[in-house]
Amino acid sequence: MKLDPSPLAPGNRSLTGVFFGAEVALQTARVRPMLDALLRDLARGELRVIVDRTFPLREARAAHAYIETRAAFGRVVLIP
């Protein structure tokens, strides 16, 4: 499936992710090396998520307000 990224431009939106779907079961020989590499990089600490701020879950409204300011650099995390 092709994705047209142009609708993401307004508002400086981004799309990040990995979806293996049925590939995991149907294309094991192709997918397994990719998963192994991702898990290896994660274990080595080479994959990092930049967390800008954390908020207690009870402050979800403040977290969303902060995100809407577009001042966040990295992820904003709600902590239960």
Image: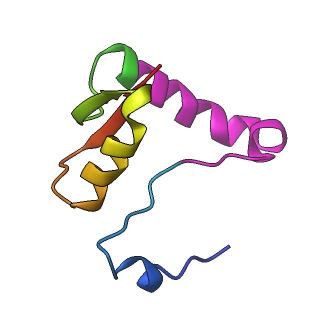
**Residue at image x 41%, y 38%?**
60
Q: Which residue is nearer to you in this view: 76 or 36?
A: 76
Q: On the picture, is 29 further left or further right than 49?
A: right
- Can residue 48 be spotted in the picture? no
Image quadrant holding the N terminus, namely bottom right
Coloring scheme used: rainbow
**Residue at image x 47%, y 22%?**
39
Q: Main secondary structure of the magenta part?
A: helix
Image height of 39 relative to 73, above or below: above
- Range shown magenta: 18-40
Task: Give yes or no for residue 36 being in the magenta stretch.
Answer: yes
Image height of 73 relative to 59, above or below: below
**Residue at image x 52%, y 82%?**
4
How far across and down, in percent of the image, does residue 17 sit?
50, 50
- Can residue 79 be spotted in the picture? yes
Residue 62 found in image quarter:
top left
Q: On the picture, is 8 further left or further right than 62?
A: right
Residue 25 found in image quarter:
top right
How far across and down, in percent of the image, does residue 13 sit?
36, 68
Q: Which residue is nearer to you in this view: 40 or 18?
A: 18
How far across and down, in percent of the image, does residue 50 sit?
23, 35
